[in-house]
Every structure is written in structure tokens, then in C-alpha cells.
Image (cartoon, grey):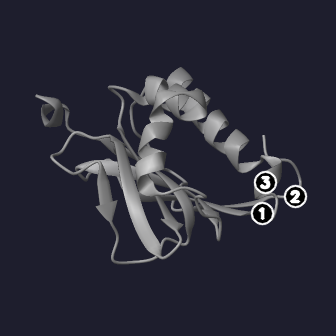
Amino acid sequence: KLGRKFKVELIKLKGQTFYTDTEKFTNTIKTIFSQMSEETRYAYPNITVEVKGDSTKEFIEIKITQIDSQSQSSPEVMLEEIKNGDFASIKENLTNLCDWSIESDFEDTSYRVNYLKSSNVKDIEKLEYKPSGFTHILRFYNKWEKYY
């Protein structure tokens, strides 16, 4: 629940379908938007929800970005966030449903932290581009054989 001070832009969301546990997915979305509406983030009222891929591709990726917002922590500290609080709750809800990463900046570094992953990627990746804001990335695979 974001309130009236926030503007959410939906990009390529209309008509997209994928299968998942709707209760866990809904709980995750509520947690992410609750974080974005915390008092320390009021200065960043623009949020985008963008879908990449579709049901004919290998995966559907949902990117939720709070434009111009960034982490106040290094990627190493952000990796530890998974152990408690909201991030622990998100991890619990998304385990065995999808891959989950965040992208952000801290000082002069742009990075991705991969919390839940099905491929052989590092926990922390340095990015060659600057994210447009603090971003949650949820990747849902369309083919079950990806998990076997």
C-alpha cells in the first residue's frame, strides 16, 4: 500500500500470464511496496513495474524499481540482509518459486545481489551500467525442466 504520494508506472504488464503460488507472490509484492513506502523513501515517489519476456520465452522477469532510490549499504552488507526482517520474509515466500535479485548503487559502485538463483551466477555481481533506482528482479521460469 503506497498511498497517494507515489506514482506507479506499469510497463508491458497487461496481458502477461505465468504460474506461481499467488499467496506467496502477493505477500512478496506487499512487502516490497511496504519497503518503498517507508518514510526514508518518500523522496522517491516514482516506481516502475516492468515485465520482460512472456509465456513463449524461457522466463518472465518482473522488475520493480523505485526510481532514483539507492541502497545505503554495500553489496556485502545487502547480501547479509537475507538473514532477517523483510528480506528474510521475501526469501521465504520466493524460495522454489523464482529467482530473486536486487540491483542498486552504493557510493561509486553499481551492483546486483542474487539472493535466489537457479543458474551458476555469483552472489554479488558488479554492473557495467547504473540502475535507474533500487530494483527487485523476480524471474519466473516457464519451463519446468530448468529445475531438473
Residues under labels 3 and 2: Cα distance?
Answer: 13 Å
Q: Quadrant of residue 33?
A: top right
- In the image, taking residue 50 as reference, residue 76 lies left or right, namely left
Q: Nearer the viewer, residue 107 or 36?
A: 107
Between label 3 and label 1, give the one nearer the viewer: 3
Quarter containing the C terminus: top left
Q: Amino acid at mark 3?
A: Thr
Q: Look at the numbered disc 2 and give the secondary structure of its residue.
A: loop
Place of residue 80 in the rendered image (x, y in percent of width and height, measured from the top left): 44, 39
- Residue behind mark 2: 5
CB of mark 2 within 8 Å of CB of mark 1? yes
CB of mark 3 within 8 Å of CB of mark 2? no
- In the image, taking residue 94 as reference, residue 84 lies left or right, namely right
**In the rendered structure, which disc, 3 or 1, sits on the residue that comes first in sequence?**
3
Q: Amino acid at mark 1?
A: Pro
Q: Residues within 10 Å of mark 3 (few under 14, many from 20)?
A: few
Residue occupying image coordinates x 86% and y 48%: 3
- In the image, taking residue 144 as reference, residue 16 lies left or right, namely right
Q: Residues within 10 Å of mark 1 (few under 14, many from 20)?
A: some
Residue occupying image coordinates x 39% and y 78%: 129
Residues under labels 2 and 1: Cα distance?
Answer: 6 Å
- Callout count: 3
Quarter containing the N terminus: top right
Residue 21 visible in the picture: no
**In the rendered structure, which disc, 3 or 2, sits on the residue that comes first in sequence?**
2
**In the rendered structure, which disc, 2 or 1, sits on the residue that comes first in sequence?**
2
Place of residue 97 in the rendered image (x, y in percent of width and height, measured from the top left): 36, 29
Residues under labels 3 and 1: Cα distance?
Answer: 11 Å
Residue occupying image coordinates x 53% and y 55%: 13
- In the image, taking residue 67 as reference, residue 42 lies left or right, namely right
